[in-house]
Each structure stands twice: as structure tokens, then as C-alpha cells.
Image: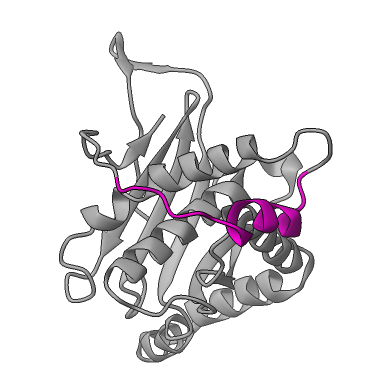
Amino acid sequence: MNDVLLACVTGALRSYLANRGEIVDGCEFRAMVPVNLRDPRQWKELGNRFGLVPLLLPVGIENPIARVFEVRRRMEALKTGYTAVLSMGLLGAVGFAPHMLQAPALGFLTRKASAVMTNVPGPQHPLYLAGARVNRLMFWVPQSGEIGVGVSILSYDGGVQFGLIVDRNLCSDPQQIIDRFEPEFEKLVLSLCMLPWEDGVDAEEAAKWLFAQRSPRPATTSNRSKSSAGMR
């Protein structure tokens, strides 16, 4: 599910940049993604054990299904590599360094990415506070150095919440990006429904079915209201 959500975020960024007139075909968006390094047997212990790894989001891929496959391939490569472990060790060493050296070191690391993204699995049952049901949970990913974009993804009680924090100099109206999250997920579901059901899903075959021979359709209007940062 994590790969699907990251692919939808990638699609939302692609749609936003294309709407601004940017050339997105073949482009990639570098983000720092935390990888959990905690031993599953230590799940009750407090503290963080993760490494930050650079993930190239395939913004240049138009096919939503191919985008999911590519995000999954890149995430698997990062999880099975040594980048996350080395990153955790490096961050730990920086933490013991004098304060005057910490800022330049962190700045060097953060200049390698344009965004930081994290996906946190929350409880899949409703929580209650003082007898009142908690309808939604949300958090904001911490920003480091000069990184100006932060994406938070949190699953809770069968739903998913997207959060976005952006430097106003990069995007004065982040709602334009948020509003593209849910449509990207719906586009992916619709694409899967349009494919032949007899065999497994293949990214190249999906591209042939969905994009190779698209006929122009008349423009339509919709009265659908804007979606919020949350998606259920």
C-alpha cells in the first residue's frame, strides 16, 4: 500500500507541475524517505531507528500503473541496500558532533533532496478520547535544512490522510497539490478496472490499453466539490 500511495503523490506532483506549464515527461523528483530499521521484536521500545534514503519519484511517467510498478521497484532496491543503514550511522555521528558542525552537515544532506516524505501506519480501528470518537489523525513531517516540501501520509480506521507543508516561496497555494491526491488514486482504480481481468496486471500492457490509442473526448464539466487533505 505504501508504494501505491507514493505513486499517487507522484502523480499529484506531476499534474500540478504540468498545470503550471512545466515539462514533466522524463523528469524525476528527489525526496528523502525514512526507512524503518527497528527489529520487529522491539516494537514496544520507545525511540527512533530509521535511516533517510533518497528516492527518485518518477514524475515523468504518465501511466499510473507503470508509475506504481516503478515506485515499488525503487523502494525495494532502497530497502535491500545499505543506504538506510549508512544514513542512520551518519546521522548518529552528526548528533555527537559539536553544534557548529551539525548545521553544515545536515545542510549538505538536505541539499540532496527537494522534499521529505513519510508514511506512518496508524491503528485500523477507531480511537476514543474522553468518550468522543476520534474521526481523523494527522501529523506533519519535520523539515530539515532547506527542504521546502513535506508530505505526510497516515492510515487510520480504514482511511488515509494526506498532509502537505510547503515553503510559500515554492507554492503559495498548496491546496492545488492536495486537491490532486484523491483524483490520482481514483485514476489508478479506474485504470485497473479498464484492463483485461483474465491475466495479471502488466505495466507495459496497461500502457498499451490506456494510452496507445486514446481518442479525443468532448470536454465535460463537474460540480464536484474540492477534496480535503484527507481521503477515505
**Which residue is located at x 45 percent, y 55 percent?**
9
- One can see residue 101 in this view: yes
Quadrant of residue 126 within the rendered picture = top left
**Which residue is located at x 34 percent, y 49 percent?**
163
Which of these two is toward me, 149 or 178? 178
Residue 142 magenta-highlighted: no
Q: Is residue 3 left or right of residue 9?
A: right
Q: Is residue 35 left or right of residue 143?
A: right
Q: Position of residue 97 (x, y in %)?
A: 48, 85
Quadrant of residue 69 within the rendered picture = bottom right
Quarter of the image containing the C terminus?
A: top left
Which of these two is toward me, 77 or 19? 19
Residue range (magenta): 201-219
Which of these two is toward me, 77 or 131? 77
Q: Position of residue 220 (x, y in %)?
A: 28, 42
Residue that sits furthest to the top in the current view: 131
Quarter of the image containing the N terminus?
A: top right
